[in-house]
Image (spheres, coloured by chain):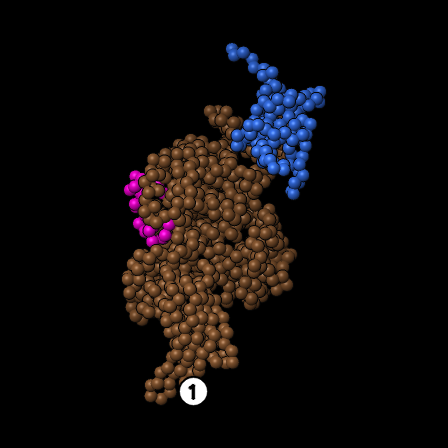
Chain colours: A blue, B brown
Amino acid sequence: MPASRPRWTRLHWMRGRVEETENGGRTLEWIGCDDAGAPIARVVRVQGPLFSGWRCYRAVALDSDARIVELRPPPPEGAGWLACVGGQVVGRAAQPLAAVRTAEAALTQG
Amino acid sequence: MTEYSLDKIRNIGITAHIDAGKTTTTERILFYTGMSHRIGEVHDGNTTTDYMDQERERGITITSAAVTCEWKDTRINIIDTPGHIDFNIEVNRSLRVLDGAVFIIEGVAGVQPQSETNWRLADRYNVPRIIFINKLDRTGADFYRAFATLKEKLDIVALPLQLPIGIEDQFVGVIDLVEMKAIVWEGGELGAKFHDEPIPEAMLEQAKEYRQTLLDTALSVDDAAMEEYFDKGDVAVETLKRCIKAGAISGAFRPVLCGTAFKNKGVQPLLDAVIDYLPSPVDVPGISVAAEEGEDETLDRRRIKADVKAPFAGLAFKIINDKYGTLTFVRVYAGTLKSSETVMNTTKGHRERIGRMFQMHADKRVEIKEVHAGDIAAFVGLKDTGTGDTLADASDPVVLERMAFPVPVIDISVEPKTKESVEKMTLGLQKLAGEDPSLRLRTDQETGQTILSGMGELHLEIIIDRLKREYGVEANIGAPQVAYRETISRPHTEIYTHKKQTGGSGQFAEVKIVFEPLERNAGIVFENKVVGGSVPREYIPAVEKGIRVQAETGVLAGFPTVDFKYTLVDGKYHDVDSSALAFEIAAKACFRDGMKKASPIILEPIMDVEVTTPQDHVGDVVGDLNRRRGMIQNQDSSGSTIIVRAHIPLKEMFGYISDLRSMTKGRASFTMQFHHYDPVPRNIADEIMSKSA
Ligand SMILES: Nc1nc2c(ncn2[C@@H]2O[C@H](COP(=O)(O)OP(=O)(O)OP(=O)(O)O)[C@@H](O)[C@H]2O)c(=O)[nH]1
Ligand SMILES: [Mg+2]
């Protein structure tokens, strides 16, 4: 008999910050809450390049306080979303749903 | 279809490289949509969209036929397009008027260089696409490998909506990842029954994995769908389809289906996908109006939205002459038009009365009384409307964005086998050139020969063949030659006096003309600066005609002279002896003498060549390109394949395909298209002139 696998941690995901664009809004983050409604994980869209004054930031993302932070080194191409748990980046994915699974997997393993 | 509703129309094209199975797929579609009750096989030479005789013999598609059929209450107008590069014009003009396309690749070879070319063409017009991996029944077919080439070669997010069950002769059906079921065909014959079943146990895990990828990718285009997923742990089929359609239209990803057209598997789900995922005329932004003279082409311009109640606007995209007369195919963008109404040809600025209107169902035509926004119909009875012209209501006389036509770069001389058929031949060729903007016709002033210019040898060969079949003229042709041009490189003023006194009345005319070079592609420009009637006004058109005709035959080697301006500044006439003919003769002679003194040069077509070669041969390929006077533009690698781009004179490309094959043991391939005209180097100019002398 294989050892019983830990129960998969499912969070309740809701839309976080949204950026206004020409054709409606674009979601920049999804927030994962536990059963008590406390936010414990996030997936955030990697944006960039961002030009500010004379500097160019190749990849940036919103932190949990909605400040723009630079990602260094920039994530590889095709990694459009970061999975974060408790302020730590636990993985990357091309699509938000896959990033959601990455975050939940990190919580499942504890 | 009784009720007319815009969202129940699809205007689609089927595009791919040569021999991928476009015609076969179209045939199957026509069969399954019930419009065509017999099935044609390409190799039996009786398919419906390949309606010209030569297509049936050669088994390739030359003209695109627009065919109408119906599937699940939706009207589908299909344009089957040719794969061979010589007929690029057909692909171009089809893409222009379509709202979506089915892009076919082969299950054995995957994406090939020519598929790439056609893919980029569709990119240029932002055409939403679904991909069909065909020929899975063939030995050596591999869905996953073919699928991988989509990302490798085209650099796209390809998204499978199906997986094959079995492969080669064991290929029996597909797993539908949207509805998570298997679709199995009960045989390979035409009209074979099919049914749904549960996904085979052995493939369940893999199917789940692929469905997760499908959800990950598709739902990311729609936040409401993401929320539905978080709520329920899955989404409704309708939601998923909505997301796939949105992504397919925006190009965020490209849905992929599979099957074998030949063995009749996968065609019905492909039709479902056309309806579910390709846009209707209201799902796309609408066609832009043409840029005004001098306006920045890159700026956003007014778009004509699909609206049945708006003033009529349509684009003539194809002309076919057959035994019933001239058929003009029009894509209607706005409004409603009834037969016998009158519209403006806004491109040319005259009125056109619409005679009868038809919709083409393969070989059969169905007369219709009115046509609406979003649809395609063939008009009969238009007097002077060419490919690319706009037809519009006089109350809103818009001109729609024009099509770009390729430059014909290969010349052949044509001569009827019997003297009596000269006129018939000219008439036939004029008609054929009227149908095909990539074909040009001229007469060499010195030799009197008729010269045809086209896109390539195959293109011209087919034209000669059509001349024989459709116009009953047998012709001898010369060897294919590069379509050189001539121009001048400095200004010169020439005076010519034409004077002849033979017996009774004489001939007299004198012209003074300034010839000046213009930039490339400027064409021929005329200005009249005569003052005080030294050349009477009625003779000016004769001067223009003389130059225009003579310019067809350049002074160096007899090629058309282009990109120059001529200004008539002065002249003399005689009350009795001057005539239009005398001025025409004087203008011709003035051109011949004047051009020689204006430093004439020969221009040659330079091609944009793309060679795809395995890494190990890249040195040989590049060295060889250099020897062919090539200018290497860049070099890209994708995996172990290298793509070399270069500008090379067309002259050096004759016979390239066989040299390339032997150099790379058949592993490299290339495509080319016209890029620009450049002056030829001295030694080559001498060679060309001595040949023409
Ligand atoms: N085994 C197999 N052969 C196929 C399949 N589809 C087409 N073919 C064969 O492939 C050849 C080319 O098919 P066509 O349908 O003429 O291809 P096409 O893309 O229209 O070709 P062009 O118009 O010349 O560009 C024909 O001999 C077809 O019978 C398929 O699914 N399986
Ligand atoms: Mg074909």
For the question of whether residue B373 can be seen, the reply is no
User: What is the total number of numbered labels drawn onto the structure image?
Assistant: 1
Judging by the rendered image, the residue that carries numbered circle 1 is B576
Of all chains, the one bearing label 1 is: B
Q: Residue at x 56, y 66 (%)?
A: B349
Closer-to-camera residue (B588/B590): B590
Horizontal and vertical percent position of residue B274: 53, 43
At label 1, counting other C-alpha atoms closer than 10 Å, the crowd grade (few under 14, some 14-19, many 20 or more) is few
Q: Type of residue at label 1?
A: Val
Front in this rendered view, residue B216 or B495: B495
Identity of the residue drawn at 34% across and 39% down: B619
The reply, left or right, for residue B161 in relation to residue A96 is left
Q: In the picture shown, does residue B175 fall above or below B580? A: above
Q: Residue at x 35, y 85 (%)?
A: B501
Image coords of residue B366 (percent x, y):
51, 57
Q: Which segment did they paint magenta?
A: B648-669
